[in-house]
Amino acid sequence: MPLPFAALSILDRAQSRTGSSEADALHHVIARAQRAERLGYRRFWVAEHHGVPGIAGSVPAVLAAAVASATSSIRIGTGGIMLPNHQPLVVAEQAATLTALTGGRFDLGVGRSLGFTSAVRSALRADKEASGRFERDLTELLAFLEGTAPVTARPTDGGRTPVFVLATGQGLDIAARAGLAVVLGGPALLRDADPALERYRESFRASRWWDAPYVTVSLNVAVAGTTAAARHLLLPEARALAVSRTMGSFPPLDAAAVALTERQDGLVRESLAAAVYGTEDEVEQQLTALQGRTGADELMVSGGAHDLDAQAASDGLLAALARPRLPTAGVVS
C-alpha cells in the first residue's frame, strides 16, 4: 500500500557539516532539490535562520531563487519567511517576483518566530512585541499580494502565490481566519495536533488562496535498510539540537559521537521520539498512522543528515513508498 498522503515534500534548512564549508551547504541544498524533482516530490522549501553557526540558510527568498533556477517543475517555497523580521511589502514583492520568474511554481510559507538570540533580534530590529503583530502583518501581506492595499506591490501578483502559515498554537487560528493552508510540525504535532487541527478545520474561512482547509505535517523522516541505520542518520541533528537548547549554539552536523550531559542525552531521545525512522515497512506503518490521526493532506520531510549519500538514499526510498500516489510535479493543491 502506498503512503496515504496526497503529496510529499522536503524542507531543507541548509545545515552545515563538519569538514565542509557553508558555501558547500548551500550547494548541497540545490543538489538535493534537483534530486527531489527527479524523484517526484511536490515541493522543495528552504528556511530562515539568522546568526546560527550550523545553518547557512539565512535568506530564503535568495536561496529559493537559486533552487528555482536549477529546477524546472518542482514547486519551490519558503518554510518560512518570518514576518516579525520583515516589512510585509518587502515580503510581498519578493514572493511576487519569485512567482513571476518561476512561472507560478513558488509557495510562500510564513511564520512568526523571532530570532534565535537577543543579539539576533536586536540586529533584526525585532522588538518583543513583533510576534504579537503577526496577524496584522499577515493581513497586510495578503492585501499587497491580492492588490487591495494602498500601495501596489510590484510585480503585481493578483493572489497567484499560494500562502501557507507555519502554525503552532494561535497560528492555526490565525490561518483559519485568513483562509490559508497550514504546516504543522515540532512538539505540537505529537502533543496537541488533534484538537488544534479540528478547530482549524471547523473555523476555516475560504479565501482566494484556498477554498478548503489544507494541512501539511512536517517532521524528520529517515528510511534505511535497518532501524539502526535510519536512527544513526538522525543522530547528528538530534545531538546538535540538544547542544543548541543547552548551550545556545547550534553546531554543524557531525557524524562523530560526542560526550553529552544527562540533560542533552534526554533531549536527543526526545528528538528521536518525535521523528519517524526505520525500514521501509516500519516508516510506512508510522506515517500511515500519523496521517490517519491528523488527516493531513501532505507530508513535508524536514531535518538534515551529515551523511549526504545516506540522506539521498532515504529521500529515494521514501519517494518510492509514496510514488503510486504522487501527482505530477508542479501542480498546486
Image: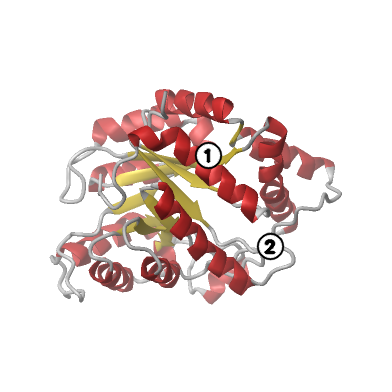
Query: From where the camera sits, is residue 112 visible?
Result: no
Q: Looking at the image, which residue is at 39% across and 37% down?
A: 323
- For the residues carrying marks 1 and 2, which lies nearer the camera in this image? 1
**In the shown orientation, is residue 156 left or right of residue 257?**
left
Which quadrant is home to the N terminus?
Answer: top left
Q: Looking at the image, which residue is at 49% across and 35% down?
A: 189
The single residue placed furthest to the right in the displayed view is 259
**In the shown orientation, is residue 240 left or right of residue 65?**
right
Vertically, is 91 above or below 219? below
Mark 2 element type: loop
Report the residue marked by disc 2: 17
Image spot of residue 141 (x, y percent):
27, 63
Mark 2 belongs to which amino acid? Arg
Report the residue marked by disc 1: 317
Label pair 1/2, CB-CB below 8 angstroms: no
Q: Residue 299's quadrant in the figure? A: top left
Q: Looking at the image, which residue is at 29% across and 54% down?
A: 163
Mark 1 element type: helix
Vertically, is 79 above or below 173? below
Q: Could you tell which of marks 1 and 2 lies nearer the N-terminus?
A: 2
Vertically, is 307 above or below 96? above
Q: Dot 2, crowdedness within 10 Å: few (<14), some or many (≥20)?
A: many
Which quadrant is home to the C terminus?
Answer: top left
**In the shown orientation, is residue 147 left or right of residue 113?**
left
- Judging from the image, the colouring scheme is secondary structure
Q: Which mark is residue 287?
A: none
Observer-nearest of 317 and 110: 317
Query: From where the camera sits, is residue 117 visible?
Result: yes
Q: Looking at the image, which residue is at 30% across and 67% down?
A: 95
